[in-house]
Amino acid sequence: MLAAFLPLALSTYRFKKDSSVKKSLKVFVKTYGCQMNERDSEMISSQLQRAGHELIDNEKVADVVILNTCSVREQAEIKALGKAGYLVRRKRTNPNFKIGIVGCMAENLGEKLFKLNGVIDFVIGPKRLHELANILEGNRKNLSIGNPKRQPLSHDFDRKLETNKCTAFLSIMHGCNMRCSYCVVPRTRGNEQYRPMEDIVEEAKFLAENGIKEITLLGQIVNNYGGRLMPVINGKTPFVQLLERLDILPGIKRIRYMSPHPKNFSDDLILAHKTLSKLCPSVHLPIQSGSNRILVAMRRPYTAERILTIVKKLRRVVPNVGISTDIIVGYPGETEEDFAETVSLFDTAKFNMAFIFKYSPREGTRSAELVDDVEESEKERRNQILLQRVQEASLYYHQRFLGKTEEVLVEGHARRGTDTMFGWTPNHCKVLFKASENDIGKILSIQIDGSTTTILSGTIAENA
Ligand code: SF4
């Protein structure tokens, strides 16, 4: 077993600026990719603020631009590289301006990034982000990837909450022990490491005390929390034990998690959706393919039949549960028959949301050694077919809420109209309604009177 507990100690929750800092810099952080990266960017921001630097929203006046990158898809890398190329011009007119690339692409491409773009100042992998403030103090080019020499203290808990925020991500583990053929994450983030349960509960309490109503637990395979290092107690896996501890915290109204693996989707977790009042009736279940042959090629240890069993059990236990998924089309060797099996799975499972990705080979993965033999136009055709299926399922799913009153956590202003706000139902449906800024962070009863494939709309219920 390669996993290990992180030797974490709780860090201070309050921000004390480090008075020894040499020069306060204006830092702009741009985030690409997943929720893990968003949470990492929060940690970066907290760390730099504690070190006396200023985090700003306007990159044009920044002394330092940090690109927190993603390597999961080629497109994400292309975007970040394009951005770094664009920043080079500023470096030419202002030699003191610094550009840093951090995150998964930094780990994956490492030193090559200095060669691709000669003016990048530092490259830091996700396991070494705690070194960032020190690296900023120096003037030399810095490459910091691979495992850290010293384990950081709990930089997980290093956070500063934005005002008016009512939802937060909470990392409960790092890394992944699986070796899916197409994925760079185990290489960039390393093997699984679990935060002690006590630390996570403490952080959730801190979040609740600071106005957070909804937490989303994060992990590459979030439901493998604890692995074999924490015991199963009374038939409950460590992840469900953690959910139970969080469910009784005052102040926290909703709990979500992202992303579970079908392999670890145990019956105790399905049951938890019935017994835990704050666990939201919405599950993101990445399936990647509906063809058992392709699942084997991807090194995903489950079958299409297993997916349908999980979906069936969830729907039996949790009425109206929302189920979304991730899917890859055009994996090397995916035939029309394989794809037809994915379509058939979609038709049966009726996912109300799906992130559909056209396969692209990632350097350093097993599948990158295979011939990428599905034409781009064919990948696009398969993408469109699944998109159509999801849109139909989503519209059908949304329509079941018409005429009902839903509890909506108000998150902020919608793009349209100053008095239009948006929020989310427990099932993770986005809702638009008229309300005021003072309602942000409240859970309002909204009478649903409109629905499209992507959104619901309504009005505050009269008896609310
Ligand atoms: S489970 Fe597979 S796809 Fe997910 S992070 Fe681990 S290796 Fe990547």
Image: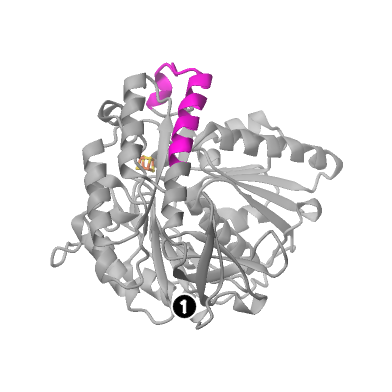
Q: Which colour scheme is used?
A: one colour
Q: x, y percentage for residue 219? A: 39, 54
- Between 144 and 117, the residue placed more toward the observer is 117
Quadrant assignment, res 426? bottom left
Could you say where residue 422 lies in the image, as x and y percent from the top left?
Answer: 59, 65
Q: Which secondary structure dominates the residues rendered in magenta?
A: helix
Q: Give the quadrant of residue 113.
A: top right
Q: Which residue type does callout 1 highlight?
A: Ala
What is the crowding at mark 1: few (fewer than 14 residues within 10 Å), some, or many (at least 20)? Answer: many
> Is residue 377 visible in this depiction of the protein?
yes
Left or right relative to 312: residue 394: right
What range of the chain is rendered magenta?
366-390
Q: Which residue is at 52% across, 45% downward?
A: 125
Residue carrying label 1: 208
Picture quarter with ligand 1: top left
The residue positioned 33% from the left and 51% from the top of the image is 260
Residue 147 in sight: no
Seen from the viewer's position, the closer of residues 298 and 87 is 298
Point out residue 233 in the picture as x, y percentages from the top left corner.
Answer: 15, 66
Q: Which of 227 and 424 is in front in this view?
A: 424
Q: Which secondary structure, mark 1?
A: helix
Residue 5 location, quadrant: bottom left
